[in-house]
Image (cartoon, rainbow, N blue to C red):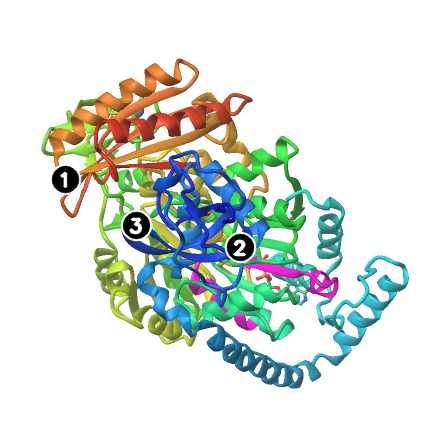
Amino acid sequence: MAERQYIQVILPLRLGWEPFYALPNGISVQVGDRIKVLFARKPYLAVVSRTDTQPSIDNRKVFTIQSVESDLPRVSEEEIAFWHQVADYYLCSIGEVYKLAYPAARAEEMKATANQARQDRLEDRIARLEAELAKAEASKRTWESTRERLRANLQQLREERDGQTAGPEGAPETVHDNIVLSPAQQRAYEGILKAGKKPVLLHGVTGSGKTEIYLKLAARTLSEGKSVLYLVPEIALSRQLESRVGMVFPGVQVYHSGESSARRRDIAARCRRGAPDIVLGTRSALFLPHRNLGLIIVDEEHDTSYKQTEPAPRYHARETAVMLAVQYGARTVLGSATPSLESAYNCMGGRFIRIDLSERYFHGNDAEVEVIDTVDERRKRGMIGHFSRKLIAHIQKALEAGKQVFILRSRRSYAPLLQCHECGEMPACPQCSVKLSWHQDTGRMVCHYCGYSEPYTGHCPKCGGELVSLGAGTQKIEEEARELFPEARVARLDSDTAQQAGYTRDILGRFGKGEVDILVGTQIITKGFDFERLALVAVIGADTLLGQPDFRSDEKAFQLLEQFRGRCGRRGEKGLFVIQTAQSGHPVYRNLSNLTGTESMLPERKNFGYPPFTRLICILLKDSNLQRLAYLAEELARLLADTLGTEVRISGPYAPAVDKIAGQHFRHIRLTMAKDKRLGQHKRLLAETLAAFEKERSWTGHIAIDVDPV
Ligand code: ADP
Ligand code: ZN
C-alpha cells in the first residue's frame, strides 16, 4: 500500500496555523487547489498551501479531505504570497485574508459555487458583448474628437518609432487613447515613467488633471499587455469616474461591494484569464485574483475610507497596494491634492518618489481664502446667530450675481468639545496634544488617548474666559439661513437626510441644475463636488474640525478644507472660500493653498512621537461584561509592558470616545513602536503574547489588533 500523502491548508478562519489533512489514495493536489474539508465538524472550502508535508501532530488524528473542488479556479502562488505579506503586516491570520479575497469560501455558500463555472462562462460572453456594444457607442462619441485623437496617435507612433514603448510580442491591439497632456502633465507623466518600480506620490492641486495622467499611464500599460488596477476610496466616486474612464476604455470593469456577487465573480474570472484589463474599484479590488498587473493607481490616497476597520484584515489600501505591486513588479501611483503625512514622509525618506503638479489645467481660477475671526466679530457685535455680518454680505453678493453657495458645517464629534468664548482656546491633553472631551456625568475633561483628566471648571485654562460647548447642527444653520435670506432656496444635506434613499442624489441633482441657491451640509459630500455656478463655499464652526480627539485632527482638517477650497470657482471664474473660526491664527488655515501645507505638520508629529515617525498599533478589547473587560485590559497592559520592554511605549487601557455599542463595552491599548530593525520582532512578540493571553484566559474573540489605525 502506498504511503499516505499529507497536505496543509488555509481555512477561512482566524487560525494561527495551517491544519494538516490526508489525501485519499490515488488523489494528488497542487498548491492553490480548492478542496472541501471538515474542521471542528463543519465543512469549509480550503486552499492547499503545502503538499508533501509531514504532520507535526499524531498521524492518526489527521482527517482525510472530503473532496477536491476541481470546478473551482486554482489560487495562484502570487495570491498566496500576497496574503502572507498582508497577514504578517497587519498581524492577522492568513485565513482572514483568504476569506476577504474569496468571500464565498463559507460553507453555506458552497452550494452556490457548484454552478459557478458554467455561470462564469455565460457571464463572460455577456460581458464581452456588453463591452463590444459600449465600444461601438463610445466610438460614436470619439468622432467628435478625431483631431485630438489623430494627434495622439501620431505622438504614440513617434514614441514607438523612438523605441520608448516597445510592446512585447503578441501584445493586444494598441490602445489608442485621445488624451493630449499639457506640458506640465507631460512632465509629470514622464517623471512617473522614470520612477520605474518605485511608488510615486503624484501631488497635484485640485483641477491639475491627475485623472488625465492616470488614463495616459493606463493606456500605455494596457498596450504593453498588462492590466491596470485603479482604486478610488468610495463607491460614489467610482460611479462618476466610470463614465470618464469609460470614454477612453469602454471595457473598464467596475468592482466594489455594491456590485452583485455574480458580477464580482465575473470580474474575478476575467482577472484570472490574464488578458489586459482595467479594473476601477474600491479597496477590496486589491484582493482580486490579479495576473499580469502592470499599474496600480491609488486616487485620493489620503482618504481614510481606504482603511478597513472591521473585520480583519484591518488593512490600508495605500500600504497594501505597494505590497501588491511588489508581487507583480507593477508601478504604483498614489495621487492626491492633499497627501497623507505617511506618503509625504515616505518621499522624504526616499521610499517614494514625489512629483508635483502645481498648475491647474484651466488657469487663473484658484479660490481666494478669507478667514473670519468670530471672537473678534462677536466683540464688535458682528455676529447674527452663527453668521458673521461679513459672511452674510458675501452670501448676499453671490446670490445677487445668480451664483450658488455651499455652507459646510463640520460633522460633530462623538464627545462634546469645549472652546473658550473669549480666546478660542480648546483645552488639550498636556501629554498627547489631543483635545480633551467634556464628560458631563463626571464633571471632568478627559483625554481619550491616555486617560488623563482634569476637573471642568467652566473657565479657560489660558485666559479665564468662559468655556462653551461647541455644536450647533446643520438643521439650526439651515433655519438661520432661511431667516437671513428669505428669497433664497435653501436645502440641507447631512447624515440625517442621507438616511432617506435617493435624497442625496436628488438634492445634488437639484443643486447642479440651479434649483437650490444655498446648500447647507456636512462633509458627506466632499467627493466629486463640482458645480459650475458654485461661487462661494463657507465653513461655519471650523473649530470642530480642529478639535477632534485625534492626533490626526489637524491633518484631516487641512485635507478637508483644502479639498473644498479647490472645489469653488471652477473654470476661469475665481471663487471665494470663507472660514469662520475662533482660532483665526491656527497654522492649518495659514497653510491652505500652500503646496507644502502637508509637510508643515510633520514636526509636531515628530515631537510627540506619532506616526509617520513611529508605528502605532491599537489593541481593541471588547466584552459585554464591563468588570471583566476592565480587569483583563489592565492585566493585559501590564503583561505587554513586561514582555515588550521599555522600547515599546504602552498607553492605556482607556475608554475610546465611543465606549459602548449594542451592549459591548470597549477598551483600547495603544502601542507605539520605533520604526527600526526591531519592529518586526516586536510585532511578532506582540501577536504571540496576545494569542497566549487569549488562550490562557479563555477570552477568545475579545481581542483584535489594528495596525496603523487612522
Ligand atoms: P484633478 O483630478 O487633478 O483635480 P481633474 O482631473 O478633475 O483634476 O481635471 C480638471 C479638469 O481639467 C477636468 O475637467 C478635466 O477634464 C480637464 N483636463 C485636465 N487635463 C486635461 C487634458 N489634458 N485635456 C483635456 N482636459 C483636461
Ligand atoms: Zn493624553
Residue 411, disc? 3
Q: Are marks 2 and 3 in contact (CB under 8 Å)?
A: no
Which residue is labeled 1 in the image? 624
Q: Quadrant of residue 130?
A: bottom right
Instruction: Say which label, 2 or 1, has the lower sequence index.
Output: 2
C-alpha span from label 2 to label 3: 54 Å
Mark 3 CB within 8 Å of ligand 2:
no
The quarter of the image that holds ligand 1 is: bottom right
- In the rendered structure, which amino acid carries the disc numbered 3? Arg
Which residue is labeled 2 in the image? 29
- In the rendered structure, which amino acid carries the disc numbered 1? Ser
Circle 1: element type: loop
Q: Position of residue 397 (x, y in %)?
A: 41, 63
Residue occupying the point 49% across, 38% down:
54
Note whether residue 370 is visible: yes
Crowd tier of the residue under label 1, counting other residues whose Cα lies within 10 Å: few below 14, some 14–19, many 20 or above:
some
Circle 2: element type: loop
Q: Position of residue 329 (x, y in %)?
A: 67, 48
Residue occupying the point 44% across, 44% down:
94
Residue stretch rendered in magenta on the structure? 219-243
Q: Are marks 2 and 1 in contact (CB under 8 Å)?
A: no
Question: Is 256 situated above or below 467?
Answer: below
Residue 386, disc? none
Crowd tier of the residue under label 2, counting other residues whose Cα lies within 10 Å: few below 14, some 14–19, many 20 or above:
some
Q: Nearer the viewer, residue 627 or 401?
A: 627
Q: Is residue 632 left or right of residue 408?
A: left
Crowd tier of the residue under label 3, counting other residues whose Cα lies within 10 Å: few below 14, some 14–19, many 20 or above:
some
Question: Is 31 situated above or below 483?
Answer: above
Circle 3: element type: loop
